[in-house]
Image (cartoon, rainbow, N blue to C red):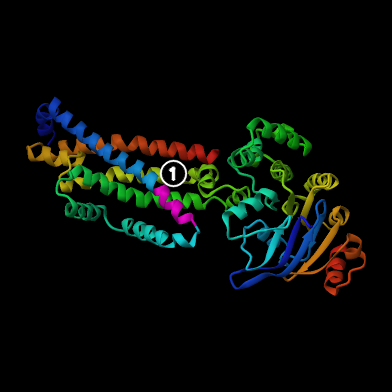
Amino acid sequence: MFDRLIEEAPRFFTYYNMIFVLQAMGTTLLLTAAGCITGFIFGFIIAAIRATRDPLLKPLRFLVIVYVEIFRRIPFLVTLFIVMFAVQIVSRNVSLFAIAVLSICMLSTAFLSEVIRAGMESVPRLQIEAAETLNFGFWRTQFRVVLPQAWKVIIPPAFAFMVMFIKDTSLASQMGVIELTFTGKSLMNRGFSPFLVYGVVLAGYFVMSYPLSRLGAYLEKRLASA
Amino acid sequence: MPLLEVKNLAASYGALTVLQNVNLSIEKGEVVSLIGSSGSGKSTLLRVLMGLLKPNAGEVRIDGEKVDYGSRSSLKSIRDRMAIVFQQYNLFQNMDVLKNVTIAPVEIKKRPRADVEREAKAILDRVGLSAKLKSYPDQLSGGQQQRVAIARALTLRPEILLLDEVTAALDPELVNEVLDTVRELAAEGITMLIVSHEMGFVREVSTRVVMMDKGQIVESGTPKEIFENPREPRTSAFVSKILRH
């Protein structure tokens, strides 16, 4: 087997193949980054909606809970296909990449909203009451009092989910999005050994997710001592 | 006209009635203490006054002006005029002492930062904490935190200061440093509504003492009347139980 790998290596590690792999890694990272950023923004909005108490907002709270509970429970591959077919009803010209971005954002929003909600709920109710009696409004209370205390609880699990999103983006290859896993399939089809191809894919995922896990572990440690 | 007037006030937690038919009026400069056993509704009354629990009946007037606890602007206005200090201090854990004290006057009342900081430093100096401006709440003792909380309330320049069992969570040796601060405020003529279990202190600082039981006001009178000559059996039972030890 090693003979074959050694023999194939010069043909495999060519400039164009490596550019192909690196570009695909870029796509994977882009999908993940889009998911994380959107997930944090919309996740916070959902968590904030769930923290409201106004009876008028009850239908909205109900809707976001349904959304979160559904999208946390269905496999990501199914989310991808649901989004793909739903989008195609509206327009046939949407790129597969856009569909993948939309899907990962829906997934990350659902998961991160729960992490953010748990973090916000870890802040004692009395802190919020104190803010209320000082005439802080809802958003000022969230941004000045709740979030600055909640992020210690939010960061560690959020990093674990970000690593999960990197891995989940691989499912977008099933729709034909050219990300890292797709390059593996494509290079295999060109006759390269699966060990060589998926060895490189494995290394690619590791290089992307390991620093993120380490950063998460580092922050967790720093926050625990703070 | 009384500064604060409470008429037939009632409140409940779900099906549980916690306040009923409460009538109370406080004149400017008075120090009124609420006494009574745990669960008698003293702290609940303060929570209702601050709008943390909505009353189901009755009315509250401040300076003759009726408070509408369902309206945001009315709530805002009453919280502008009254400040509360909680049993658990409730300082913002993510802000240092100076920030805790200045954030509301600067950001909510929009007063110039320099003025507020000058005033806050003077008040913190008065409660003996001028060396702790940059400390965070978790670096302070309970007594120090409670004095910061009092400073935070005072910097709001409230017309009425509500103190909700401000020494109940403190170690015994720290109680006096907080009570001394409150004594000084009383001597300065700040209008206060105090909930306390420190009977010696209540007797000393109050102009009037109000006895509560089961969500109702049982009787009210001067400290001398309440502690030496209570009219109601429930008051004498409570006072004799407290003073026995």
Residue lying at 72% horizontally and 45% vertically, measured from the top left: B150
Tell me the quadrant of the picture where the N terminus of chain A can be found: top left
- Left or right of A3 on screen, residue B72: right
Mark 1 is surrounded, within 10 Å at the Cα level, by few (under 14), some (14 to 19) or many (20 or more) other residues, namely many
Residue A61 percent across, percent down from the top left: 42, 59
Query: Looking at numbered disc 1 in the image, what kind of residue is underneath it?
Result: Pro
Residue lying at 44% horizontally and 49% vertically, measured from the top left: A116
Q: Is residue A140 above or below residue B9?
A: above
Q: Is residue A6 above or below residue B33?
A: above
- In the rendered structure, which segment of residues is drawn in magenta? A43-52
Q: Say whether residue B169 is visible.
A: yes
Camera-nearest residue between A63 and B112: B112
- Left or right of A96 on screen, residue A62: right
Which subunit holds the residue at mark 1? A
Main SS, magenta region, reads helix
- Left or right of A167 on screen, residue A186: left
Residue lying at 66% horizontally and 61% vertically, measured from the top left: B48
Q: Which residue in the protein does label 1 denote?
A: A156
